[in-house]
Image: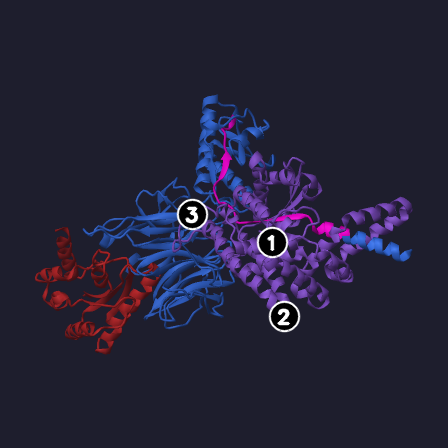
Chain colours: A blue, B red, C purple
Amino acid sequence: MIKKIFLVTLLFSLFLTGFAKAELSIDITGARSEPMAVGLPEFSVSGQMAKEDAQETAQKIVQVIESDLTSSGLFKILDSLAYLQSFKGIEDAPAFVDWQAISAEALIQGHVDYLSKKQIRISVRLWDVYAAQELYSATMEVDEKGWRRAAHMIADAVYKRITGEDGYFDTRIVYIAETGPALNRIKRLAIMDQDGENHQFLTDGLNLVLTPRFSPNMQQITYMSYYKDTPRVYLFDIESGRQQVVGDFPGMTFAPRFSPDGHKLIMSMADNGKTDIFEMNLDTRVIRQLTRSSAIDTSPSYSPDGKQIVFNSDRSGAQQLYVMDANGKNVKRISFGNGRYATPVWSPRGDYIAFTKMAGGRFYIGVMFPDGRGERLIAEGYLVEAPTWSPNGRILMYFRQDPPNRDGIPGATKIYAVDITGYNERRLITPVDASDPAWSPLLSNR
Amino acid sequence: MKKRLFAVLAAVALISGCASTTPAEEEDEASAAAQQAAEQSEAFVQNAKDRVFFGFDKSNLSADAVRVLKVQAEYLKANPTKKIVIEGHTDDRGTREYNLALGERRAVAVKNYLISRGVDADRIRVISYGKERPAVVGANEAAWSQNRRAVTLVKD
Amino acid sequence: MGLRLSFFMRLRHCPFLFKTVQAAFDHMPIVFSLLLHFFAVFLLTYDFSSAHQPEVVSVPMFVVDLSQVKIAEMTNLPPKLIPTAAKKETKKSVRTSAYSKASAKNSVQPETRGGKAGTSGGKKSSSAALENDLNKLLKSVTAPQKQPESAASVQPPANSIKNTGNQGGGETDDPFKTLLASVDGIKSGMGYADAHTAAEVNPDEIVTEGIEGGQGGSYMQELSVSEKDMIGIKLRECWNLDAGVRGVHNMLIEIRVFLNKDGTVKDAKILNKTKYNKDTAYRSVAESARRAVYICDKKKEDSPFKIFPKNYEQSYDTWKTLLLRFNPFDGGVI
């Protein structure tokens, strides 16, 4: 009897285990990758302002959100003519079926309330149309004049909730504005919002300036200037406009970059035919030499944790990429492909190193993993150079120069941005020719 | 025409010992401009003796370069009060930062040769412009080879 | 493989089991039922580490049944292929299972583990789910080769599997190529591998599918591999993935779908909530996968889940919940 019970139990258990495993499982490998379809209807308005004026503000905000999200390549805003629902207030519940009908995957609902003539309160809600879920909601009060930044911040919030990563719309770009003849270019520091708005020149063009880079706290820019025919690394204070030379070096200093914590500056110094990498503590002004070779070691860039430095060197005979500890120890070569590799930049999210590659007479912008595997080239041209990362490590910006034509007129120099996937390359509109872009951190994060 | 005018201006600047970093002129035009040059500088500019050229991504001196530099060294020894600035330049087929270093290497190569020929190191200053100040515009080897250069400027 | 077959065999006995258990419940007090449950849970818990032991015990009983299995009915195998490849295969595997004490560990693992091992091990090659399955198969098929007496007869199917493995690999490069553009490669459009992966079935593939069908084993009418693939492909088309998300190369999203009897989606739940709550990038990809389920569901008659009420209406219990495993690259990038 006991034996029988045991057997029955055993069989029953086996049956159960079999059943538990028998749940049908299906593997889905690969996907399509298209911009996410987003419904962005007009924001409703209320409060202490004529309705038309309030609506105008609301429309401007919606336009900035739309242009931000669209420019990322990850979203497409559906044509508002197709919308079946319009919202009267922020409490209006979305009719999900109506939004599903036009294949919207997400929906942004918003409201602008004029608390006074000058103060507005913006409310937004983000919906997952198919799961019929609210994904995000926020309210912010800003001066009416701050509507543009508020719109960027809303776009950042939407971007963050959908992609899971920080946005980059509330950021700025510093770059070199180029004018004048090809043989004697006039170069000036210039700064603008990430979308090209609020453009302004920072220097007058009397001195040749090159390779600007933002400090992590956004208050300073480091760059190289030929002031008094002495090429050196400088710091530029954005608020005061004050410029100061960095350190007292015997030779040319160039290729500066901030450390991720903003307390150190790393750069190259060329003296007597040798170029090595130096680090300067900005608080104590102590200088430390990190590489010692007869080769050219330049374009250093810190890893986001500040523990490693990637740079390019021709110590093997041609330019290749190397990684070393922040103290200069453990130098390891990471690039082994055909061609020459230069200007490595470590992604802020740490997963990639971007670089300029030269091979077969062409220039490329590419990315590789920090150990050198997985090289992928994502832009190509007669001359493409100087990648810079968006603060979330998702977009690469670089400049592109067309070849000169036969009459000796130099090709135009323009800034482009491309997604890390290699798609959605787009040009940044600048008032004049532009090179050496550098992306700021997220302003609202500092 | 514009270019020619420019070359003339450059030569004048050279004579007057102006400190400005004038872009260099093309070879054939250089000799035309040299006719107006003052006696001391003539040896330099005439027959394009103010510059030497380099191979791609190279900073070693060719036999041609050595011939030019010998003339320069003789001139400097004959004019012991003159000081010089050596500008290092590259073509645009490299990245900006690397080219700054490469230009410096080229200028230093010239400097070291002149020192080896007896020129006092204190009289020589080097500066690199990388690819920022090309001599000619063009997307071909002819143009690039003229841009890979070190130019010696005489200062009083 | 032996293990899988033994499941299969065991499940063939379902009616018998039901009857026995029913009878037991009729006559035994409730305490006994508790005991039963307890023991069942106990076995479930220890399933992974000691699963093969009870199976080894029951092997002799299963051997008898194996000869009666008609693989063709379950698997879309063209009739002429059955005797040559598939049938031999099944017999071999029975033998393997007889030796399973020695060889079970390297030949086959329980299905759930096999899946995981496949995805993590697939990092080296740009493989896809199909190839993974094939690799699993390959392993399980080649395992008997180590045993001298079975080596010769196993050879042909092993080769054919290798071939399809290569083809599968070539095909599944596509998502990688198109999700991450490269200027030195073909900067093609936003396309993805078309449905022809399932539509074009060459004989070699059929062999493997046959084996998989016979092996994966279902106690009731389960899906054939091509039907499974079709569902996977349809879901892939519904899945709009942001291929640039941090860590996407190594992500595996598991979603449990609850289906109504008419094949519409009742609910879709993202599993692995801890990671979902902790890792925003994972959350983003998981939500896109869940969206894919709903988007597919909204396709009405084109919904991948419609195949269940259409072809398997009777066995609703077997498909009322599904485990979907979304894997953008299957480790293919690294």
Q: Is residue A250 visible?
A: no
On the rendered structure, is C202 left or right of A16?
Answer: left
User: Label 3 neighbourhood size at 10 Å, few (<14), some (14-19), many (20+)?
Assistant: many
Nearest the eye: A241 or C146 = C146
Q: Element type at marker 2?
A: helix
Asked if marks 1 and 3 fall on the same chain, the answer is: no
Chain of the residue displaying label 3: A
In the displayed image of the protein, which residue is found farthest to the left?
B35
Q: Position of residue C312 (x, y in %)?
A: 66, 41
Q: Nearer the viewer, mark 3 or mark 2?
A: 2
Chain of the residue displaying label 1: C
What's the residue type where badge 2 is placed? Lys
Report the disc number at residue C146: 2
Q: Position of residue B8 (x, y in %)?
A: 13, 56
First of labels 1, 2 by sequence position: 2
Report the disc number at residue A194: none
Which residue lies at the image location 72% right of the left edge and 65% below the top edge?
C98
Q: Is residue C310 above or below residue B88?
A: above
The residue that mark 1 highlights is C210
Q: CA distance from mark 3 to mark 2?
A: 49 Å
Chain of the residue displaying label 2: C
Q: Is residue C307 above or below residue A57?
A: below
The residue that mark 3 highlights is A423
What's the residue type where badge 1 is placed? Gly
First to last magenta residue range: A15-44
Q: Element type at marker 1?
A: helix
Q: Position of residue A55 (x, y in %)?
A: 47, 25
Q: CA distance from mark 1 to mark 3?
A: 40 Å
